[in-house]
Amino acid sequence: MKTQVELVATGSELLSGRIVNRHAQVLGEALLPLGLTLSRETSVPDDIQAIADAVRMALQRVDVVLVSGGLGATTDDVTREAVAELLGRRIVKDEASLSGLREKYKIFGRELSPISERQILVVEGSVVLPNPVGMAPGQRIESGGKVLFILPGPPREFNAVLSTHVLPWLQEAFRGALSVTQKILMVCGVGESDLAAQLEMEGFPPPGLDVAYCASGGRVEVRLTATSDRQAVIDQASEVVRRVLGRHIFAEDRLTMEEVVGRLLLERRSTLATAESCTGGGIGQRITSVSGSSAYYMGGIIAYDNRVKISQLGVPETELAAQGAVSKEVAASMAQGVRQRLGADYGLSITGVAGPTGGTDEKPVGLVWMAVADAAGTVTSSRRFPGDRDWIRESSTLFALDLLRRRILGTV
């Protein structure tokens, strides 16, 4: 069988922009260790003919096709009908799934209606794949030497059926395939093009290594991929990346900046307090998104108005008058103030002009000052971020946490 897999994602909401389709990312990453690749992803509306056409063309190109979505109980859930029509099969009721569905409804104190029973309809001859976290089961259908999987669309259910049923089957079916190994390095403080240029000067990429760069929210993900028999190539390449980028690498394997900072604080049994102006609590939100952050995060003060900076953080009124809220001096005072007021080991602050209005020639939109205060003193850093208000605020929180990371590590 071919080692390429295709995904057909159904749902008009995917094409209208109401829902972001993340199935391709999940599937692509899950296939790599099995020696398989996701060669194409096609999104189609909730239309029987459109779904049937997409599946037919996919089956002409590859031997394994996954279809996501359209297994619910509403009138726009037509994936099973499309597949049945394509293969010339009937749609039948799966009694085992019906029994399980009744039990699930009973647990929630609900009555199973005839409409809801549509969720257990399957294509004749399919192997039913029980859904451990939802109602509609998945299906595996073999036809003409090809294999077709149909999975529920909600991400939680898609992921559950994929990991419980689909991946184990693929692993067994492609046991002889040469697996693929990957190393991911997370970078902050270097743009994607500059990063690539620096690595190219070092002869990147070496033969047998696939390198990909993905920029998002101020960070760049560097993915090094090779077949499992070339692990040494990945190891050598990662050492080159570390030598070239040094302190800009903050994590491996997609750890977030807030997870990295949290681990550093936990290891040192240190605590953190934040003072935010332009980000309005964005740093605190990132920190508290990590489970267990209460062990090191004391809390934060959102000092959007200058009067709050004065009354709650102890920023001198004369300093604000002389330097302005967006300044090195005020950022430092904010970090020192929140550290003292909340009794934390580290105080992290941020103040800036997020726009789209409020900028001047001296302090343009996108200018941000950050500071970290600890027992040894205070460090400050400034950066001007391009983009709209949301982008400036998101990027600012990342770089503020990176400043804290580097302060904890003693590199600033």
Image (cartoon, rainbow, N blue to C red):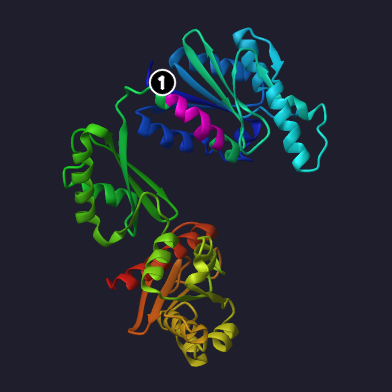
Left or right: where does residue 41 sit relative to residue 52?
left
- Give coordinates of residue 343: x percent, y percent: 48, 84
- Which residue is found at the position 52% from the left and 91% from the top? 317
> Quadrant of residue 405 in the image?
bottom left
Let me know if residue 162 is in the magenta part: yes
Vertical side of 78 occupied by 372: above or below: below
Residue at figure coordinates x 65%, y 11% from the top left: 85
Q: Please, is residue 106 above or below residue 305 in the view?
A: above
Q: Position of residue 138 (x, y in %)?
A: 60, 27
Q: Kindly identify the residue that appears in the image at 25 percent across and 56 percent down.
A: 245
Q: Which residue is mark 1?
A: 173
Q: Quadrant of the C terminus?
A: bottom left
Question: Magenta stretch?
Answer: 160-170
The quadrant of the image that shows the N terminus is top left
Of the pair 109 and 337, the residue shown nearer to us = 109
Q: Is residue 371 visible?
A: yes
The location of residue 149, given as percent across then percent down, is: 54, 22
Q: Secondary structure at mark 1?
A: helix
